Image (cartoon, grey):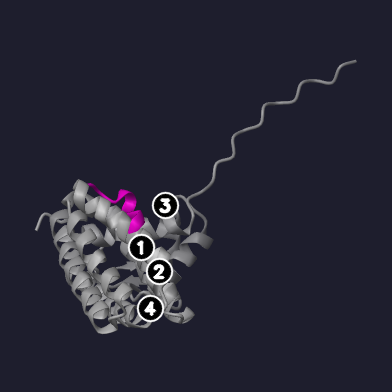
Amino acid sequence: MNPAPSAPEKPVTRAPSKPAVVRGMLTCLLSGEWNGGERYTESEACERFGVSRTPVREALLELQGLGLVELRRHFGAVFLPFGPEELREVYAVRSLLEVEATRLATGRLDRAKAEAMMADFRRIRESGGIDPDWRHDREFHAAVARASGNRRLAAEIGRYGDLVQTVREIVGAQALGIHTTTADEHLAILEAIHSGDAAAAAEAMRQHLAQASDTAAASVRAMRGQ
């Protein structure tokens, strides 16, 4: 007697992970749907995002570490304001970290890697093209952070870089057509590093992140219709 045919396997569906919950919460804050000072419980977040408590708790802990939420015992999460000015504060911290990393990276960044990145940014500049998903941008900042030789500094830069990338995806900053400007700024940093001028490289990074801060703040204002 032949065995009964087995039932077809159901496709495995995965609940949204911590990054998806972080993105969802940041979207609510950036859009102004959630305001600073508002209380939000884990159960409310679970219901909204369709997840268990674990990714919600992980997301809240990450946002707490970035200074975007306060977790109060037996009370829940209280979100802090996160609009254009708060985003500028994020960039100010990022600048403190990355300017120092750039100074340290001068003389340490692999020359072949630097030359390859410069070729990428020249292509973007000369073609008037874009940097899809800011891939070259992220690789550049990660390479400079690693070349600093300070693992803790690099890890902290990566944490803020992840936040900035999430904000970019939410507000659609890529549509602002700033990739040629960014390519020029990256080239200035890399050329200073390549020539061994630590002071010039650090200053070029400072100027680059000041421009990025202005662009990000303008993007959030546009998102809010301000």
Q: Nearer the viewer, mark 2 or mark 4?
A: 2
| Residue 49 - label | 3
| Residue 105 - label | 4
**What is the magenta range?**
129-136
Q: Residue furthest left?
A: 226
Q: For the stretch drawn in magenta, what is the main secondary structure?
A: helix
Mark 4 and mark 3 in contact? Answer it, CB < 8 Å.
Answer: no
Q: Residue furthest top?
A: 1
* Residue at 21% in and 70% down: 208
| Residue 115 - label | 1
Q: Amino acid at mark 2?
A: Arg
- Whether residue 1 is in magenta: the answer is no
Residue closest to the eye, 102 or 20: 102
Between the residue at mark 4 and the residue at mark 3, the CA separation in whole angstroms equals 41 Å
Where's residue 56, x and y in %?
46, 62
Q: Earlier in the sequence, mark 1 or mark 4?
A: 4
Q: Earlier in the sequence, mark 4 or mark 3?
A: 3
Image quarter (top left, top right, bottom left or bottom right) of the N terminus:
top right
* Residue at 25% in and 49% down: 130
